Image (cartoon, rainbow, N blue to C red):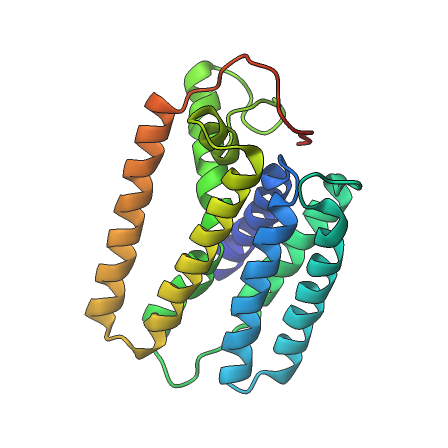
Amino acid sequence: LDLAVTIFWVVGITNALNLLDNMDGLSGGVAAIAATWFAVFALAHGQVLVASLALALLGASLGFLVYNFNPASIFMGDTGSLFLGFLLAAVGIKLRFLEQTDRITWMIPILVLGVPIFDTTLVVISRLRRGVNPLTTPGRDHFSHRLNNLGLTPRRAVLVIYLLGVLLGALASALPFATVEQAFLLFVIVTASALLALTWLERNGSVSHRAAETFTLE
């Protein structure tokens, strides 16, 4: 079971960062935020090598964002986004919280990477409802596109998603100090909120056919 879950996690997160690469600076920025939280957690628990990998990933992402943030002059492509996703999945697995039970700590990487997980879930459900292949069919049906359809500019949509990533990381940082009951309550609240948001976006943030305001690549 551990092996199956590990494979699902690595393949899922790797592809989630690839799917998230649909607006200028989005995938790189979300990766930088997640890497920051992973570095903080690793340093706080004495995992110097894991923290070093997370900090290297953070530095690479920030250096790339200088040229990739809206309006972008360079673009990531599948090779870059898949690489970011694979490294984030690996760092999430390597995190250890020795003073806390595994009944709680498994939630921490999921919350830190909640944005790409949410976007992938939204896209898969939306495309399955429309009867198209969820992984090979491109489209403007991602979280960022729906925020754009609701009136945000591409840059503001990306910044809102950045803020959400920071918030989820902050919630994850509270878990090592929580009881099992408190941790599960927080996780249930976040999951329920995500499902409500997903349902609302699917109904109200549906993809329009207007011209894209930014370069998108999936």
Task: Please determine whether, in this image, residue 13 is positioned above or below residue 2.
Answer: above
User: Which quarter of the picture shows residue 39?
Assistant: bottom right
Residue 68 placement (x, y as % from top left):
72, 45
Q: In this picture, is 77 found above or below 63?
A: above
Relative side of 150 to 29, left or right = left
Residue, far top:
209
Q: Residue furthest right?
A: 74
Q: Position of residue 151 (x, y in %)?
A: 44, 27
Residue 204, picture quadrant: top left
Residue 34, x across and y down, in percent:
54, 60
Image side of residue 23 versus residue 68, left or right: left
The residue positioned 75% from the left and 39% from the top of the image is 77
Image quarter in which the C terminus is found: top right
Residue under the point 50% across and 76% down: 41
- The percent position of residue 62, horizontal first and vertical second, equals 69, 59
Residue 187 placement, left or right of 3: left
